[in-house]
Image: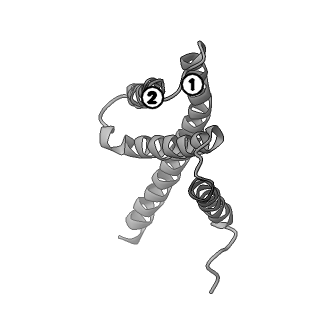
């Protein structure tokens, strides 16, 4: 029995890579006693990735709402969190005058790409399921 196959190879690589990078960042911070900017950035990217993935995964709870509204609300929640984190960080470090602008675009562009990929995959899956249900209904009618 194969645990890793062609269907899950890339997700397994991504999971292992993520765990190794997070382990390296945390271990460096503990051993060196320093928590530098790149370590903070990597951990922030991980936290934002988890948060964005969670928010996207909750779309099914709002099936009665128009999709565009759901996407917009999801984005507004997430960009609000990003801006809140950016604002909180100003209490610990000085921020560049373009800091909010940079964080806005640094989050918005990857998030937009992720949303397009996510919802395209979702629609593809729904289309496949609808086709499967149609085939089942047709086969059921023929069998009667």
- Which disc, if any, is residue 75? 2
Q: Residue furthest top?
A: 97
Between 37 and 53, the residue placed more toward the observer is: 37
Q: Quadrant of the C terminus?
A: bottom left
| Secondary-structure class at tag 1 | helix
Please state which of the two labelled residues, at mark 2 or mark 1, is closer to the viewer. Answer: 1
Between 21 and 59, the residue placed more toward the observer is: 21
Location of residue 15 by image quarter = bottom right
| Secondary-structure class at tag 2 | helix
Circle 2: is it few (<14), some (14-19), or many (20+) Cα within 10 Å?
some
- Which disc, if any, is residue 103? 1
Q: Is residue 42 left or right of residue 123?
A: right
Q: Position of residue 32 (x, y in %)?
A: 63, 54
Between 143 and 43, the residue placed more toward the observer is: 43
Q: Position of residue 73 (x, y in %)?
A: 38, 27
Q: Residue at x 43, y 57 (%)?
A: 133
Q: CA distance from mark 2 to mark 1?
A: 14 Å
């Amino acid at each position: 029995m194969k645990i890793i196959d062609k269907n899950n190879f890339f997700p397994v690589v991504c999971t292992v890579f993520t765990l190794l990078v997070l382990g390296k960042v945390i271990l460096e911070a503990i051993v060196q006693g320093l928590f530098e900017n790149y370590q903070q950035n990597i951990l922030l990217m991980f936290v934002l990735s988890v948060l964005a993935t969670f928010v996207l995964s909750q779309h099914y709870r709002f099936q009665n709402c128009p999709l565009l509204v759901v996407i917009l609300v999801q984005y507004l929640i997430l960009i609000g969190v990003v801006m809140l984190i950016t604002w909180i960080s100003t209490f610990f470090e000085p921020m560049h005058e373009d800091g909010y602008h940079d964080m806005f675009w640094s989050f918005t562009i990857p998030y937009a790409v992720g949303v397009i990929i996510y919802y395209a995959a979702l629609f593809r899956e729904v289309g496949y399921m609808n086709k499967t249900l149609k085939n089942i209904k047709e086969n059921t009618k023929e069998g009667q």
